[in-house]
Amino acid sequence: PFPSIRALALSPDGKSLLVSTGGHDLDVMDVLSLKRTRQLLGEAGDGVEAVCFSSEGSLVASGSHSGIVVRFFDTGDVLSVISGISSISLAFIVSDEMLMAAVGHTVLLFEVTSGGLLRALSGHSATVHAVCVSPDVKTIASASA
């Protein structure tokens, strides 16, 4: 039996699942066997609610109640940390150079390497629960309740 899963993402090659059970560690699971192959430990913050892979699978991001962590998938090394925000949905965009995050009533765009805020997209009157980007990267979408 699986514990309560809060967020998951399938790797672009279809071989791995990145799984959050709501704690601060992330499990990497083999898709075929559903066995944990390794963990990405700590630094993801408490209550991880969102995970995603970059389009090429070299980076992963996790969003928690205390911030966002971007790390290299192969090594688990942290690339950048965006502190002080709570994000419940994430998506890499523009050749994996930017990260889109649902934060409150706003969609925020961050530069992946530095974690610097590039732009805030407003217009929602309620909490944004989901963000996504089209494969051709020409359209982004966000949804609120």
Image (spheres, rainbow, N blue to C red):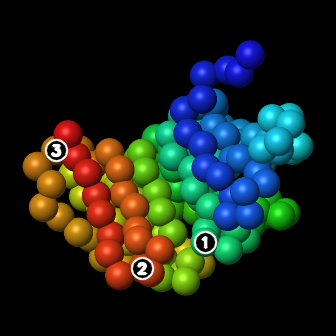
At 61% from the left and 68% from the top, the residue drawn is 54
Q: In the rendered view, would you say 6 is above or below 139?
A: above
CA neighbours of label 1 inside 10 A, class few (<14), some (14 to 19), many (20+)? some
Residue 98 x, y percent position in the rendering:
48, 76
* Residue kind at label 1, given as amino acid type: Ser
Contact (Cβ within 8 Å) of mark 2 with mark 1: no
Q: Nearer the viewer, residue 60 or 110?
A: 60
Q: Is residue 101 left or right of residue 121?
A: right
SS type, badge 3: loop
Residue 24 x, y percent position in the rendering:
65, 37
Residue denoted by label 1: 55
SS type, badge 2: loop
Q: Nearer the viewer, residue 113 or 101?
A: 101
Cα distance between the residues tagged 3 and 1: 29 Å
Residue 28 x, y percent position in the rendering:
78, 45
Label disc, if present, on residue 67 of the rendered structure: none
* Residue kind at label 2, given as amino acid type: Val
Q: In the rendered view, would you say 56 is above or below 10?
A: below
Q: In the rendered view, would you say 73 is above or below 58?
A: above
Front: mark 3 or 1: 1
Residue denoted by label 2: 137
Label disc, if present, on residue 126 of the rendered structure: 3
* Residue kind at label 3, given as amino acid type: Ala
